Amino acid sequence: MNIFEIIGAVIGLFYIVSEYRADRWFWPLSLLMSAFYAVIDFTSGIYANGAICVYNFIMSIYGILVWRGVIQKRTADHGGERHISSCPRRYWWQIITVTVLLSALLTWLLGYLHQSTYTLTSGHTVNLSLLDGISSALTIVAMVMLAHKWWQQWFLWLLVEPLMITIFLLTGNYASAVLYAVFEVFCILGILHWRKESLKQSDTQQLDR
């Protein structure tokens, strides 16, 4: 554990609270957190998740544009910002299919490239390509859903966090492991809060009609 990792964990706490509240500071914090964890992951040898952090950085820029209404503007109230909503059912089979295929592809690729072989705190080495592959695939899909402000995105993060906690514990990144344990709690709270906001918005739209 080092000071850089602790700073990243503190940023992460602000990040998850901001995501829970769905406020406008979330994506700037996502940019900052992605940059921090890209450095942490690459220096720890967690290359797959380091690459995912780079992807998250790019998606954060896209998320800012979508949430602010610059891309696919849908509402005129709240400054034109996108509301929390429910993922249309027609997309679910695509989400499941893409997640499964990406998990299989990334697991194979990471194993083939030997990019998920970590040195444990015990000094032994272990291949965690399955954990890396699944967590990376879930993160890729969840970030797209988050950019669209679909409340079901929390379910994917609910699956990601235990995988990341395991990886961080095995590699000795304890501050990050604690942070992701906090994330897991917020995933449950986020499901309840975002679903409530989605239903509230749906009722409002029906009344307006």
Image (cartoon, rainbow, N blue to C red):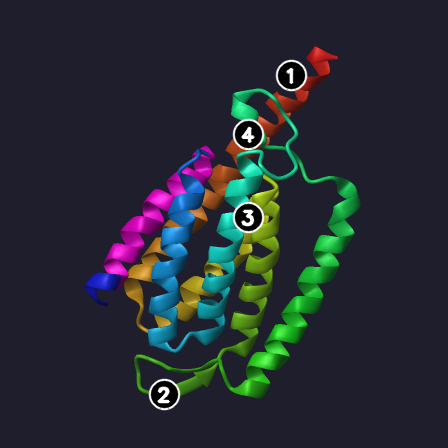
Q: Amino acid at mark 3?
A: Tyr
Q: Position of residue 154 (x, y in %)?
A: 55, 45
Residue position marked by numbered label 4 in the rendering:
81
Q: Are marks 4 and 3 in contact (CB under 8 Å)?
A: no
Q: Amino acid at mark 2?
A: His
Residue position marked by numbered label 3 in the rendering:
62
Query: Disc 4 versus disc 3: distance between alpha carbons?
Result: 14 Å
Q: Is residue 16 magenta?
A: yes
Q: Position of residue 57 (x, y in %)?
A: 46, 56
N-terminal of the two: label 1 or label 4? 4
Q: Amino acid at mark 4?
A: Glu
**Quarter that holds the C terminus:** top right
Instruction: Decide which of 122, 81 is in the foreground and name it.
Output: 81
Q: Is residue 50 magenta?
A: no
Residue position marked by numbered label 1 in the rendering:
204
Residue position marked by numbered label 2 in the rendering:
124
Q: Which residues are magenta?
A: 5-22
- The answer to whether residue 181 of the structure is visible from this angle is no
Instruction: Decide which of 120, 150 is in the foreground and name it.
Output: 150
N-terminal of the two: label 1 or label 2? 2
Badge 3: few (under 14), some or many (20 or more) residues near its Cα, within 10 Å? some
For discs 4 and 2, the disc positioned in front in the rendered view: 4
Secondary structure under tag 1 reads helix
For discs 1 and 2, the disc positioned in front in the rendered view: 1
Relative to 157, residue 88 above or below: above
Q: Amino acid at mark 1?
A: Thr
Secondary structure under tag 4 reads loop
